[in-house]
Amino acid sequence: MTSDTMTEIKNNNTRRVAALVVLAIIQLSLFHVRCMAQTASEYRMEIGGGLGLATYLGDFNGSIVKGMKPMFSAVAKYRFNPRTAVALNINYGRIKGEAKNANTYYPLGLNSYSFEHGLMDIGARYEFNFWPFGTGQEYRGAQRFTPYIYIGLGMVIAQPDKTELGLSMPIGGGVKYKAADRVNLALEWTMHFTTNDRLDGTKDAYGIKSSGLFKNTDCYSYLRLSVTYDIWAKCRTCHNDRD
């Protein structure tokens, strides 16, 4: 066996060893990534707040863009999984309406009526994400961006000449974005159907009696941007199943 042949055999063996080392490093890296993903914390709750615009819809305003006033929110959510959650919202804002914006005639002499006063609602709602929401580390296939929809039930309190109470049914949708591992942004629009016709301070502005839970009652909507922070970690490991 010549020296050239011996050199070639040594080179081949060196290349094989190097290839095996590279493959081993890749396998270990992949295993580490999988374990990191499986041991990442999955959070049960979000807390935060929001800012937005409130719009009254009723006998004295028929547009969702007229008479917008500032509103503020406190938000808390409990996640069942990356697709569903229950949210508690406390909102406070102001609503405004003017007869001249409705482009109609009021037989009861309310053609110059206008109002502006505070409104608060407290309610719970069920949220559904179209895609699993998360960083993708705590849940396989989760995405940082998703559209979502929701429906709920709550109570509304308005303050015209006297305090007015009613049930509120919020229905809406929006988009979520996970800006950081534990920071969530959400932009949403919500329509609140209520059981009270005096949120604007008047009742039966057209003099027409009606019956029904949400018939001939006042409504309002919110356009809101919220920021929430994840809390209450739900931990898991490579060797344990989820709780």
Image (cartoon, rainbow, N blue to C red):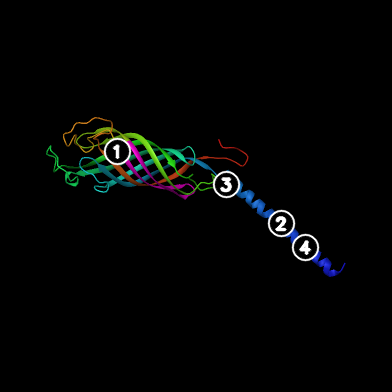
Q: Secondary structure at mark 1?
A: strand
100, 107: nearer the viewer: 107
Up/down of 214 relative to 23, above or below: above
Q: Secondary structure at mark 4?
A: helix
Residue at x 30%, y 41% (from the top left corner): 92
Write down the region rendered in magenta: 169-193
Disc 4 designates what residue? Answer: 12
Q: CA distance from mark 3 to mark 1?
A: 42 Å
Disc 2 or 4, which lies upstream in sequence?
4
Q: Is residue 172 magenta?
A: yes
Q: In which quadrant of the rendered image does the N terminus lie?
A: bottom right
- For the residues bearing labels 2 and 4, Cβ distance under 8 angstroms: no
Q: Tell me the mark number nearer the camera, choosing from 1 and 4.
A: 4
Magenta segment, prevailing SS (helix, strand or loop): strand
The residue type indicated by label 2 comes to Val
Disc 3 or 1, which lies upstream in sequence?
3
Disc 3 designates what residue? Answer: 37
- Residue 21's label in the rendered image is 2
Q: Tell me the mark number nearer the camera, choosing from 1 and 2.
A: 2
Q: Tell me the mark number nearer the camera, choosing from 3 and 4.
A: 4
Disc 1 designates what residue? Answer: 120
